[in-house]
Image (tube, helix red, strand yellow):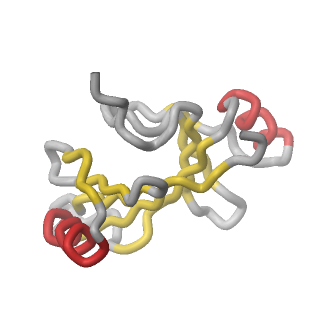
Amino acid sequence: MSRPQLRHLAFTARDAESLAHFYRDQFDMEIFHKDPDGSHFLTDGYLNLAILQQALDGEVPTGFNHFGFLVEDVQDRCQRLVAAGSPQPAPRHTTRPFAEYRAIDPEGNWFDLSAHGYLPPPAG
């Protein structure tokens, strides 16, 4: 892989389970992970769709939340972003096994960086 690959989109929803079931039922996506907070993660086998459960306080609006790139070397990509004037990407401190770093583009859009990918680990 020489070019970063867009592999992950995330939306915040008022009812993550119902929205996940919509994409499962209407587009044959597979739900492969559920968080204790109600967030659901789906895949079509190539691109993942995260449906993040909106918290009761509603600080994060519903709709588009972030996207994620699969890259060969996260540290190299972080250095390139900083050299281009972006803020230092921050480590993702979460139990979700999907992305190592969160960054922000010049317009304020969040995106994740991952070297291990966005699909669940192989069974075994």
Toward the right, the furthest residue is 83
Occupied quadrant, residue 54: bottom left
Horizontal side of residue 84 vs 66, given as left or right: right
Number of labels in the image equals: 0
Occupied quadrant, residue 70: top right
| Residue depicted at 44% across the width and 63% down the height | 65
Horizontal side of residue 123 vs 81, given as left or right: left
Q: Nearer the viewer, residue 70 or 27?
A: 27
| Residue depicted at 16% across the width and 48% down the height | 37
Residue 9 percent across, percent down from the top left: 46, 61
Toward the top, the furthest residue is 124
Q: Quadrant of the N terminus?
A: top right
| Residue depicted at 52% across the width and 58% down the height | 67
Toward the bottom, the furthest residue is 26
Q: Quadrant of the C terminus?
A: top left
Is 32 located above or below residue 44 in the figure? above
Q: Nearer the viewer, residue 31 or 113?
A: 31
| Residue depicted at 19% across the width and 47% down the height | 34
Q: Nearer the viewer, residue 20 or 81?
A: 20
Residue 82 percent across, percent down from the top left: 78, 40
